[in-house]
Amino acid sequence: MTTAPTATVQGQATRAVHGTTLKDAHGAPHMPIYNTTTFAFENTAALLDVVDGRTPGALYTRYGMNPSVFALEQTLASIETAEACWAFCSGMAAEMAVFAEYGRDGIVCIGDAYGGTLELLASQLPLLGINTTFILGSELEKLDGFLAGGARLVFFETPTNPTLEILDIRAIAATAQAHGALVAVDNTFASPVNQRPLEVGADLVIYSATKYLGGHSDITAGVVLGRSELITPLWSWRKNLGTTITPETASLLARSLRTLLVRVTHQNKSAQAVAEAMEAHPRISRVLYPGLPSHPGHDLAKELMQGFGGILTIEIGGDAAAASAVADKLKIFALAPSLGGAESLATQPSTTTHHGLTVQERLHRGISDSMIRLSIGLEDPADLIDDLTQALG
Ligand code: PLP
């Protein structure tokens, strides 16, 4: 079990740099890549001490018992102020472990979610007897009934993908707690810099570390954090499904975490500037960004979040083709799914993340075909606004 060093009074930026107490034998400033699958012992007694959990130590990399993975998990737990953390080979793998362990009596999924998550919940998990009820963020009054009916896991993203709806983690957690159910929040869009769900009542927080935590569009990884007693059972799922993060990726991710606060703080500011410029543009019919007073979740976001994040969605007056025409003219923004990297990306949810849903399902979720989701990177915001303006021109 990888746990945070101690609850610490240091700031989050300091913890992102110094969040692990683990050091290598040679004084390396951060944990090197232990590119090895197995670890040798002096004798059988020493081996059994690690196997039986009496002594912490490396053993076998697929088990996550590798120094590069331990150091990463300790840093992640420290940044999130979580008791415990496991790192996975992808965000989907992290979600799967949570659903497999805690979703067996039924899951309630609230609001929009990443298309792959919706597909897993709606199509694959029922084959294993894990069933999900989907409700919109505007139907929270139904939650009580579904939990009374036996569902034991509430799952949601906030802000949601791609409409940036803000869900009240505190209120949902209170309802779930009254029924003895757990709340798992996919905090990928916010990152731990902008929102820490565990501090406001959630039981588990999940990340696609492929996004802001990785931050450079060069790794695929996932993370689950929470109390030790909830995180411990996920270990066997990760071990036996073989969904552990690799040491190479763990090391890259740990390196990225050192700049997490600098990156996300910059992206917050730039996204605010781009959102304000887009809101003033005559060709844009709607801008969805929690930092805008016009956003329906603005006041709630001010209460729950430390920053409004680097993602915004613009709606072009017209149809999908009109939006594609604008997206195709962008020069700095790359036309690509994903988010959270150094480079700005533009994507039409109807052609990528939510392509697997029918038009009706998309509309039910408030996703129109003329939406373009923008992930704001680390470029100069003025250049991003110029790029959007020329594409809209
Ligand atoms: N959660 C969110 C909010 C996502 O956007 C994604 C991927 O886009 C995932 C989870 C899945 O993560 P991964 O691609 O790392 O498996």
Image (cartoon, grey):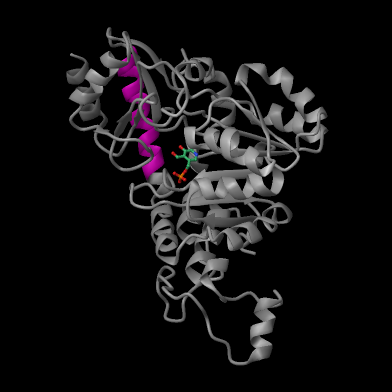
Question: Which span of residues is magenta-colored?
Answer: 263-279
Dominant SS type (magenta): helix
Residue 389 x %, y %: 21, 18
Q: Is residue 344 magenta?
A: no
Q: Quadrant of residue 278?
A: top left
Q: Quadrant of the N terminus?
A: bottom right
Could you tell whether 289 is left or right of 113 in the image? left
Residue 158 in the image: above or below residue 8 = above
Q: Residue furthest bottom?
A: 43
Position of residue 369 in the picture relative to residue 379 (left or right): right
* Above-or-below relation of 152 to 164: below
Between 265 and 211, the one nearer to me in the picture = 211
**Seen in the image, is 392 located left or right of residue 179?**
left
Is residue 107 something one can see in this rendering? yes
Q: Picture coordinates of residue 61 (x, y %)?
A: 51, 70
- Is 194 placed above or below 10 here? above
376 and 137: which one is in front?
A: 137
Residue occupying image coordinates x 48% and y 19%: 362
- At x 40%, y 50%, the residue is 214
How many numbered marks does the figure carry?
A: 0
* Position in image of residue 269 (x %, y %): 37, 31
Question: Toward which corner of the image does residue 266 lie, by quadrant?
Answer: top left
Left/right placement of residue 124 relative to residue 274 reads right
Quadrant of image for the C terminus:
top left
Q: At 76% from the left edge and 39% from the top edge, which residue is drawn?
A: 105
